[in-house]
Every structure is written in structure tokens, then in C-alpha cells.
Image (cartoon, helix red, strand yellow):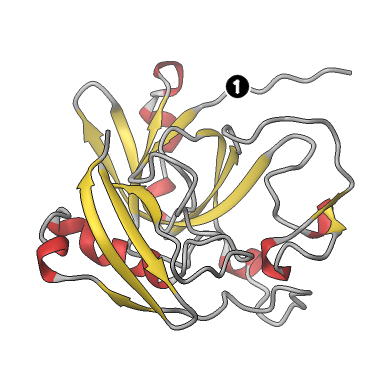
Amino acid sequence: MHHTITPIAFYRGDFGEKFGVPRQAGIVPALEGLVVFEPSFRDAAALRGLGDFGRVWLIWQFSETPCEGFRPTVRPPRLGGNARMGVFATRSPFRPNALGLSCVELAGLEERPGLGTVLRVKGADLMDGTPIFDIKPYLPYADAWPDAKAGFAPDAGGTLAVELPQELEALIPADKREALRAVLARDPRPRYQEDADRVYTMNFAGREVSFTADETTLRVTAVRAAE
């Protein structure tokens, strides 16, 4: 039986490309974005009561991941790309229906001209334009199990020191600087790449941010307007 689902909304945020997007929701709380509903779902009645919740679940699609059929195993970046695990034991985008699940902070509901009511959310691990299929309230008593086993990913990993020269930081919008530093501290590089001389470029908030990194420090080398 074939099933079809339709996006009810799209995420609008600072990442124009996949590179640099946090690997999990919530690890960069300073990141802020909008959930913008499609015209046919812009009914304020559908959001009645949602503002009373502090967090929501977003069910979305890895829309930039090519579908190449079912793969029973994948190589998790957490394991350096060297070991295979069952796809259902990972959060890899290479999954049968390419669906993602993210718990984000609900910072508020706002009326925007031409967009109706939008959701301001924080800590999303989504790129700009990600289709969202459903939204559900987060319930702490049912959804939080901090003592549960976490398999091969017991924590969010370490952070890097970030060197961002003042003259380059000035090229980033003031309200985006905290989020940028937090994203860079989480080391956006693929886990299996450790070349300290390689220059990486990340599309963030309409800027192309270039940097190098070693085991302890990430150094921003250039900031320019994104093409």
C-alpha cells in the first residue's frame, strides 16, 4: 500500500546548506528559526493551546539527501565512518523514508505579515527550507528518560576553542554571533576528516564562513557574503 504525506510547514533558518547544521537538536540552543505554515494550514485554531508548551517535536524530512533505496547498515560519523551499524540504530539521513525527529524549544507564536502565525523555535538541527510534516507538544513526564542507555552515542561530544578575529566577527549580524560561535565550537567538520590545514567553508546567516581546525581549536579565516 502506498502512502503520501504532505508538508504542513517549512523551516526558515540560517543554514543554506547541510554543512555546519548541528548533528542533533538542542546542542546549539542559541540557533533560532521559524516554522512557517503552508497556506492551507494557516489556521490559528490548529495552534490553540500550543503556546502553553515549552518544547515541541518536529517531524520532518531530510529533503537534501538523495534516495538510493533501502540500506540496512550505515557508517555513523560518531564512529569515525569506519564501523557499520544497523540503520535503525542510528539517526542517519539515509533511511527508508528519510524522516527526522527533532525536539526544539518553542520560543513563541507570532503573527507575520503574509505568513499568518509562525512558530519561533530554538535549537533546531535543520537547514533552511526543510519540509515539516507534523508538530507535536513535548511532554516531560512521557518524553524524558535521562537514565536510558545511549548505545554508541552516550553524549554530545567535546567542544573546540573558537578563534574569531574581531574584524571578521563584525561582518556577522550581531544577533547571530552567539549562535555562530556555538556552532563552530561543536566542530562542523565530518568526524572522519582531521586535516588541520584544510579550509572548510560554511554557509550561515547569508555569509560564507571559512575556517581551519585541529584537535583543540577552530580558527575562522574569512567571512564574506554568500553567493
Q: Is residue 12 above or below residue 105?
A: above
Q: How many marks?
A: 1
As helix, strand or loop, the secondary structure at mark 1 comes to loop
Quadrant location, the N terminus: top right
186 w.r.t. 129: above or below: below
Image quadrant holding the C terminus, namely top left
Q: Identify the residue at image location x=73%, y=69%.
A: 79
Q: Is residue 151 left or right of residue 29?
A: right
The answer to whether residue 13 is left or right of residue 73 is: left
User: Which one is nearer the viewer's eye here, 116 or 95?
Assistant: 95
Q: Residue at x 78, y 30 (%)?
A: 68
Q: Which quarter of the figure has residue 185?
A: bottom left
Q: Is residue 86 left or right of residue 110?
A: right
Q: Residue at x 80, y 36 (%)?
A: 96
- The residue under label 1 is 6
The crowd level at tag 1 (other Cα within 10 Å; few <14, some 14-19, many 20+) is few
Above or below, comparing residue 166 to residue 206 in the picture = below
**On the image, which quarter does residue 142 sit in?**
bottom right
**Image spot of residue 128 (x, y percent):** 40, 38
Image spot of residue 159 (x, y percent): 46, 79
Residue 65 in the image, given as x and y percentages of width and height: 63, 36
**Circle 1: residue type:** Thr
In percent of width and height, residue 4 lies at 71, 19
| 161 lies above or below 31 | below
Task: Return the residue nearer the eye: 152 or 54.
Answer: 152
In the picture as drawn, the residue positioned furthest to the front comes out as 197
Q: Residue at x 32, y 76 (%)?
A: 162
